[in-house]
Image (cartoon, rainbow, N blue to C red):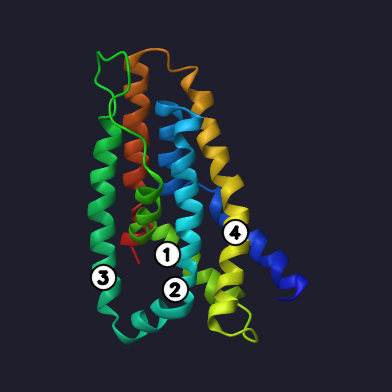
Amino acid sequence: MTTEILIALIGFAFASSITPGPNNLMLMASGANYGLRRTVPHMLGISLGHAFMVVMVGVVLLRMFESYPVLNIVLKVLSAAYMLWLAWKIANAVAPEAKEVTGKPFTFLQAAAFQWVNPKAWFMAITAISAYAPQNMGVLAGSSLVAVVFSATNLPSVTVWAWMGVQVRRWLGTARRLRMFNVTMAVLLVVSLWPMLMT
């Protein structure tokens, strides 16, 4: 991988990781509801789970999607259904009169598994592999290199969103405000589905 391609990959990884999307909205909600320490497994699950996804996209999945286009439709339907369910869970994380948040933050495995139904994660993985994977290293080695660079850039980016959620929590001193925040995050999560559904 040349220096120019490496810099371009880091730029793409940073831009796509730091901008709003399902992962970041959920991390902000988790930071606000559970704090930064309890959100760490969620953050690691996103970064390492997405890195694994990048490798799998490079080695196997691009060929499958080319051979069976119907898989794209199946993925969209499953993604939309799961994200609507998650939006409902976020919106109901705290009851209007509750003093403490109910529910639990995402575990490492839940966050890693979520990447497979996250439309933005698919876009990021497919673009990273198709645009930046070195052709002279072999499929597995090239995909793995892209995954490592992407993960190293992604983790600090997603940490920012969880940290912002923690900062927001300071202004959410009442259950009513926290409920309004959670409902807002849930609505934004549903809105983030719009670009996927329009393609």
Q: Is residue 125 above or below residue 89?
A: below
Residue drawn at 63 percent across, 62 percent down? 149
Find numbered disc 1 in the image and state the secondary structure of the residue it sits on.
helix
Q: Nearer the viewer, mark 2 or mark 4?
A: 2
**Residue named by callout 1:** 122
Residue drawn at 40 percent across, 54 percent down? 112
Mark before the other along the chain sequence, 1 or 3: 3
- Residue 57 is labelled as 2
Residue 55 x/y as whole percent: 49, 71
Q: Residues within 10 Å of mark 3 (few under 14, many from 20)?
A: few
Count numbered badges in the picture: 4
**Residue named by callout 4:** 13
**Residue named by callout 3:** 73
Residue 52 x/y as whole percent: 47, 64
Check whether the beta carbons of the residues at disc 2 and disc 1 lie within 8 A of each other.
Answer: yes
The amino acid on which the numbered mark 1 sits, given as a three-letter code, is: Trp
Q: Residues within 10 Å of mark 4 (few under 14, many from 20)?
A: many
Q: Nearer the viewer, mark 2 or mark 1?
A: 2
Q: Which image quarter is the C terminus in?
A: bottom left
Please say whether residue 56 is visible from this viewpoint. Answer: yes
Q: Is residue 193 above or below residue 147?
A: above
